[in-house]
């Protein structure tokens, strides 16, 4: 007779009663063990391992006991799972189907002690599926009933549990004020009304040594008791519980507990918070707006998304990067664009100005216009798209496509018509679309487009250092030491030693730097960290790799 190895699985949704010496899990296990013993003549053998999940809902598969059991089934260590009722295994029809598939794949099965099914027949599987459908329905109805009860209780202003906010203590279905902590809450509101920002409140709260509540979990883990961070301060300032109210999702109801902060004062603080947030957003938008956002596309049709990094000194450097690099971050061999935003915006704005100012473009638009009208349009063009007004120039762009070796720029028909005060129907479609060739210069993950007809970007810091190196070298030839030069110019001897090497760069390398055509990696910071060889040929070989 074939031996059938049986494993008992037990589960209880709540932790209530699990601390008892003989609890629900024990009762389930005893019933299952008795059933296995009654089937001994069929070759059933009970395995000693226990697979229990106490306090975990049947609506999730994230159950350690069940996971371990299914792993043992797949390893061939278990032939049959014994449960007291099927809903102990799962209450989800979808999860049940997945479990049955895994059991079938391992040539295993399950048995419900109180519900007898023969899943080998179509009728048995139909009955089982119907039962699981009702189990899932019961679970969803229960969940809806609980949600409705919570909503109704909060409308009445009752405290429905959760983490008790600092300043209060739970008292049945309401809260009572903890005077010691309430003093801290009032101080935080006072500081915000006085200082106006959460950052300043945190600094002052740290100085006053204000501390968060010390909490201890049921398992004895202690947390809190530290200084307030900004998010915690913001949470306290925006929590309506302190105004004697209860929040339920987007609604706020009058609570049955006493307020720590007067409701009128709490409303005033919310107004201050909203006004300060609007100011921050406006300031940030005006300074760091990505003017080509939503207009850049690569050869695959993928949109280039604004992104940024920060240097160690906190300087924000903007980029436009292919959306797939963000969406599929972490995948191997992922290719895409990562272009410096500010440089790209300046160069594309220059191309658009060139296009709008070109006689060919203006003739296409104003070929039948009188001379005074041409003069008027020219004056408007000079006013609205002059150098330095990048935002107004880039606003004329509808779309920019980055294709192999060239940019295709589509101007916005309506914006161009408004600029020249023309009927948009009279603007030839071909005139508002033009191309610009480019070459790629790549270093690491960063790529730059060298656009034809646009001015190159020169590294003024590196150029200044080269000039400084020649000046200091002349002083060395005059007999000064590095230390004396450093004292004269208020810098360190180490700095003089770093910079003076630039006086010995090959002439063609210096020329490329002055024209802004040197390799991307040849920057002032790189020169500070790397010693260049004295020979010009060796210098060219090293710099060519940057």
Image (cartoon, helix red, strand yellow):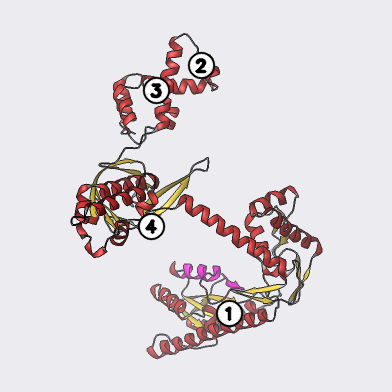
Q: Residue 152 in the image: state x and y as whole percent.
A: 64, 83
Q: Classify residue 9 as left or right of residue 129.
A: right
Query: The N terminus appears in which quarter of the rendering?
Result: bottom left
Give the mark toward the camera: 2 or 1: 2
Q: Nearer the viewer, mark 4 or mark 1?
A: 4
Disc 1 to disc 3: CB gap under 8 Å: no
Few, some or many residues within 10 Å of mark 3 (<14, 14–19, 20+): many
Compare marks 2 and 1 and give the one earlier in the sequence. Answer: 1
Give whichever of discs 4 and 3 has the lower sequence position: 4
Q: Earlier in the sequence, mark 4 or mark 1?
A: 1
Q: Identify the residue position indicated by label 1 in the image.
A: 33
Q: Viewer-nearest of labels 1 and 3?
A: 3
Q: Can you give x and y, in whole percent of width and height, for residue 509 in the image?
A: 31, 26
Q: Is residue 11 above or below residue 428?
A: below
Label 2, secondary structure: give it.
helix
State yes or no: residue 212 in magenta: no
Above or below: residue 358 compared with residue 273: above
Magenta residues? 48-73
**Mark 3 sits on what residue?**
502
The alpha-carbon separation of the residues under discs 4 and 1 comes to 50 Å
| Inter-mark Cα distance, 2 to 1 | 91 Å
- Does 395 sit left or right of 370 as displayed? right
Q: CA distance from mark 2 to mark 4?
A: 53 Å
Residue 107 is drawn in which quadrant? bottom left
Q: Earlier in the sequence, mark 2 or mark 3?
A: 2
Residue wearing tag 4: 328
- Image marks 4 and 3: residues in contact by CB distance under 8 Å: no
Q: Quick one: SS at disc 4? A: loop
Q: Which residue is mark 2?
A: 485
Mark 4 or 3: in front is 3
């Amino acid at each position: 007779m074939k031996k059938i190895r049986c494993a008992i699985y037990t589960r209880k949704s709540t932790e209530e009663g699990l601390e008892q010496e003989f609890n629900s899990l024990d009762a389930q296990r005893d019933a299952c063990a008795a059933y296995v013993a009654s089937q001994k003549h069929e070759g059933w053998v009970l395995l000693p391992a226990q697979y229990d999940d106490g306090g975990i809902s049947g609506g999730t598969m994230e159950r350690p006991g069940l996971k371990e059991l299914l792993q043992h089934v797949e390893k061939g260590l278990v032939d049959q799972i014994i449960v007291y009722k099927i809903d102990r295994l799962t209450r989800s029809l979808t999860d049940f189907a997945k479990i049955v598939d895994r059991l079938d794949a391992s040539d295993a099965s399950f048995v419900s002690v109180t519900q007898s099914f023969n899943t080998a027949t179509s009728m048995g599987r139909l009955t089982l599926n119907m039962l699981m459908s009702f189990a899932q329905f019961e679970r969803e109805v229960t969940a809806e009933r609980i949600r409705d009860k919570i909503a109704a209780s909060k409308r009445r202003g009752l405290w429905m549990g959760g983490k008790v906010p600092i300043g209060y203590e739970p008292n049945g279905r309401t809260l009572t004020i903890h005077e010691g902590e309430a003093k801290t809450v009032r101080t935080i509101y006072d500081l915000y009304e006085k200082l106006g920002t959460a950052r300043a409140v945190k600094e002052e709260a740290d100085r006053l040594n204000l501390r968060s509540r010390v909490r201890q979990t049921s398992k004895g883990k202690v947390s809190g008791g530290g200084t307030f961070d900004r998010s915690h301060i913001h949470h306290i300032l925006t929590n309506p519980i302190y105004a004697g109210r209860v929040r339920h999702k987007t609604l706020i109801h009058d609570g049955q507990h006493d307020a720590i902060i007067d409701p009128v004062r709490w409303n005033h603080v919310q107004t201050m918070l909203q006004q300060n947030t609007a100011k921050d957003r406006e300031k940030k938008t005006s300074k760091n707006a990505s003017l080509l956002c939503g207009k850049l596309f690569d050869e695959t049709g993928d949109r280039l998304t604004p992104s940024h990094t920060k240097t160690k000194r906190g300087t924000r450097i903007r980029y436009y990067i292919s959306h797939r690099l963000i969406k599929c971050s972490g995948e191997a061999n992922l290719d895409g664009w990562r272009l410096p935003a500010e440089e790209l915006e300046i160069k594309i704005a220059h191309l658009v100005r060139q296009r709008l100012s070109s006689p060919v473009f203006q003739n296409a638009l104003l070929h039948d216009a009188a001379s005074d009208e041409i003069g008027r349009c020219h004056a408007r063009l000079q006013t609205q798209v002059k150098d330095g007004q990048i935002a107004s120039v880039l606003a004329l762009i509808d779309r920019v496509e980055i294709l192999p070796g060239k940019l295709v720029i589509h101007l916005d028909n309506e914006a161009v018509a408004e600029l020249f005060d023309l009927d948009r129907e009279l603007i030839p479609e071909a005139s508002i679309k033009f191309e610009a060739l480019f070459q790629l210069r790549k270093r690491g993950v960063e790529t730059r487009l060298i656009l034809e007809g646009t001015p190159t970007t020169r590294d003024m810091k590196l150029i200044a250092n080269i000039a400084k190196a020649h000046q200091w070298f002349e002083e060395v030839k005059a007999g000064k030491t590095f230390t004396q030069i450093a004292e004269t110019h208020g810098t360190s001897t180490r700095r003089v030693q770093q910079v003076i090497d630039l006086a010995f760069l090959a002439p063609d390398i210096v020329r490329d730097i002055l024209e802004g055509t040197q390799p991307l990696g040849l920057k002032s910071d790189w020169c500070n960290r790397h010693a260049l060889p004295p020979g010009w040929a060796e210098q060219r070989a090293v710099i060519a790799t940057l």
